[in-house]
Image: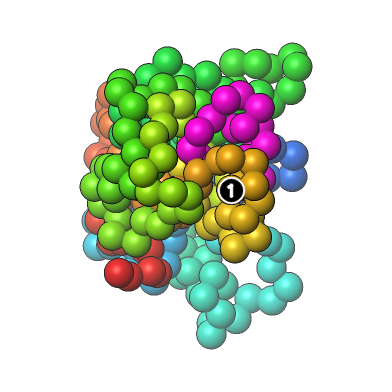
Amino acid sequence: MTIKCREIIHVLENYAPPRFALADDPIGLQLGHPNQIIERLFVALEMDDEVLREALDFGAQMIVVHHTPFFKPFKQMREDSFHNRVVLDMIRHRMALYTAHTNLDCVRGGVNDVLAERLGIKETEILEPLNENTTSAGLGRIGMLPEPMTVKALADCTAEALGNGNVRFCGDPKTMIQRVAVCGGTGAFLMLHAVQKGAQAFVTADVKHHEALQALDMGLCMIDGGHYATERPAMSILARHLETHLEGVEIREAQRCTDPFRS
């Protein structure tokens, strides 16, 4: 069976509709042609030289990512620039690139539901709906742990569940919590929503010093699970979804860890 790029896009956009993306978020097909024949599809959180080499070794004609190298407009295309080089190499190899970013964050079954499930959080609801007309999708999730636990125990569980030895937290380690909010990636801007919905702890990433102080002042414990670690699990779910809905395409998930931080 011959599969065209546009057929893969159709499956992707049924899973994470573009209308769920935040304003000005660059998503969709960013390199390639909708009628390009795709026999091998590669799924990765983000691109670097080694991820691209992994995709090329696999023989991929198309790559699906969460973090696009096109997130900020290019002002030049230089071989000695990190993102430029990856894009130029993809163009040389006539590869298609599709990005599912905040639409994959917001959709039910996407980044935030996968994160909540990994942490054992039940009875989840959306932390911040997209708008009053779209309450079935939005940023972050909030729900309940099966049993109360200390914030230190939740931090340890987060580290284990996400495979990240760099998890850090703020708050009294002995504080007992059960209602927990999550947001994969950079999500501290949602802390007020978390407090208003009764969260005792908030698992997210990229928490800054002053954000942690603000959270503590509001009585909210913060757990920083790492940007890569909180979003990476969703890519495995996306890859499995594509495998289920596409026949005649070989699909592979990136194995390289692009988390720049080490413990």
Q: Is residue 183 above or below residue 74?
A: above
For residue 150, which quarter of the picture? top left
Residue in the picture at 48% in, 49% down: 171
Give the mark count: 1
| Residue 164 can be seen, yes or no | yes
User: How dense is the environment of label 1, judged by Cα within 10 Å: few (below 14), some, or many (20 and up)?
Assistant: some
For residue 136, which quarter of the picture? top right
Q: Nearer the viewer, residue 170 or 243?
A: 170
Q: Nearer the viewer, residue 135 or 215?
A: 215
| Residue 10 can be seen, yes or no | no
Horizontal placement of 78 versus 46: left or right?
right
Q: Give percent across and percent down for residue 83.
A: 54, 70
Horizontal placement of 225 versus 60: left or right?
right
| Residue at image mark 1 | 216
The image quadrant where one finds the N terminus is top left
Residue in the picture at 56% in, 80% down: 81
Mark 1: amino acid: Leu
